[in-house]
Amino acid sequence: MAQQAEAQTVTAPDVLDRLDLGAGHCAVGGLQWGDEGKGKIVDLLAQRHDMIVRYNGGANAGHTVEVGDQRYALHLIPSGILYPDKTNVIGNGVVIDPAVLIKEIKGLRDRGVAVDKNLRISNRAHVVFPYHHVQDALFESALSAGRGDNKKIGTTGRGIGPCYADKALRSTAVRVGELLDDCHLGEKLRHIVPLKNVMLGSLAQEYGQTFEPFNVNTLYQQYREYAQALRPLVCDTSELIYQATQQGKRVLFEGANATLLDVDHGTYPYVTSSSCSSLGLHTGAGVPAQQVGSLLGVAKAYSTRVGGGPMPTELDDEIGQRIREVGREYGTTTGRPRRCGWLDLVAVRYSARLNGTTGIALMILDVLAGLDRLKVCVGYKHAGKKLDGFPAEAGVLAAVEPVYEEIAGFAQQIDECREYDELPAQARAYVELIERHTGVPVRIIGVGPRRDQIIVRS
Ligand code: IMP
């Protein structure tokens, strides 16, 4: 309980008065390739909302929130769970690995965080099974076999793609609502598991991997137990959000992963399998468009990416290495080192347009302190010609030449700054350059990992 008491008092709520979020609900989403620091922004804004809703992705995501000396790494549960009086929703667009979710609930309870009816799970969300993990790994091996590692998507290995593929295929998918019905679950698994065993067994044989066929009864017993644990939390979450809206409650939508990983609009095929941009919240939570009033886009002050795929501003030098070490740029979910590079404003401008971003939260600006010069990509050239917009083909993006604008860096540490005017002039010039090139105001600036290390601009 001690953690929750602290959770209510650590961030000065008055800075939030400066953020006029206007009428309607609010959405927060990443404008790059993920890991922008969305967890911290959701955590901050949760104070002014009654309900926090996750609408996409699965245990591939990882949000880190620091409260005092405690660090919480959340994968499936919205970070609003750290406040005792908020309802947290895992919407229908999420793919849920019950083993991960139950472990996460237990981990929070063990640390004194109450998890009960303050967490609700959609009966329409899809369920991840162990065969999805195996399928994920086998497909990745198949993509790299004889073709070099660069064709791999570099997935998190959490079974996300195969589970969404089954959702689209329908006959091999299981929804949370079905999990709760013993008879139905048994019937489904008797149909699905032999199919998976044939498919995965022959793939494994082809690529020289070992494969242990799945047993229907073992899976059935295991998932029945999961169903028992989750049953009290399951409901029609779209209806729950509707009822909250009717009662004048404020809802915060938390987009997992990020816009450039969106299955439709990201750097396809090097993306995840869900609709990560704010466009996905309407289907992923079952909420109509006109109910969302403000859209906060979260961008890191530089670029990072995990996994494969093009990243025009990637730095394979000591500056990239320095950013990785100072920024602790290692994955929350997989621990993989993140690829680091200069801020890419062509990408951020594209993402901001797609999301309808009304304000930017610029995170982790402190990590750039001490660099002599800062480069920002403001355009792309391809085959010697300036490109308009953000290319749809990964091959074109991989071949672009970034056009940089270069400005002086800032030597001073900025982690103690709490007002915009306290930032060094060069740091302010950096922020204003971002506003000029994106046309979107920077409303929040992150200057350190802790909850209170934040500047909010009116
Ligand atoms: P998947 O979502 O595990 O299928 O992975 C697809 C791609 O998205 C890989 O390049 C992952 O590294 C990337 N990815 C998925 N989730 C995240 C995230 O939360 N942060 C950063 N990258 C992610």
Image (spheres, helix red, strand yellow):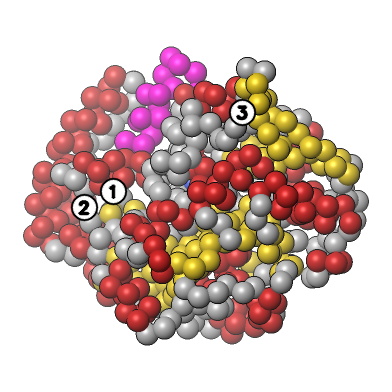
Q: CA distance from mark 1 to mark 2?
A: 9 Å
| Mark 1 closeness class: few <14, some 14–19, many ≥20 residues within 10 Å | many
Question: Is 311 a magenta residue?
Answer: no
Quarter assignment of residue 41: bottom right
* Residue tagged 2: 174
Q: Whole-percent x and y of residue 329?
A: 66, 46
Q: CA distance from mark 1 to mark 3?
A: 43 Å
Above or below, 186 relative to 142: below
Helix, strand or loop for the magenta stretch, by majority: helix
Compared across the picture, whether 73 is left or right of 91 comes to: right
Give, as a three-letter code, the residue at label 2. Answer: Val
The quarter of the rendered structure image containing the C terminus is: bottom right
Seen from the viewer's position, the closer of residues 455 and 110 is 455
Above or below, 252 relative to 381: below
Q: Which mark is residue 129?
A: 1
Residue at horizontal 35 percent and vertical 73 percent from the top: 241
Compared across the picture, whether 90 is left or right of 404 comes to: left
Give the magenta-colored segment's residue range.
133-150
Q: CA distance from mark 3 to mark 2?
A: 44 Å
Q: Residue 301: in sight, yes or no?
A: yes
Q: Residue 61: in sight, yes or no?
A: no
The mark lying in front, picked from 1 and 3, is 3
Q: Secondary structure at mark 2?
A: loop
Give, as a three-letter code, the residue at label 1. Answer: Phe
Q: Is disc 1 in contact with disc 2, using a CB cutoff of under 8 Å?
A: yes
Q: Secondary structure at mark 1?
A: loop
Residue at horizontal 53 percent and vertical 66 percent from the top: 294
Question: Is 146 a magenta residue?
Answer: yes
* Residue tagged 3: 387
Q: Is mark 2 within 8 Å of ligand 1?
A: no
Q: Is disc 3 in contact with disc 2, using a CB cutoff of under 8 Å?
A: no
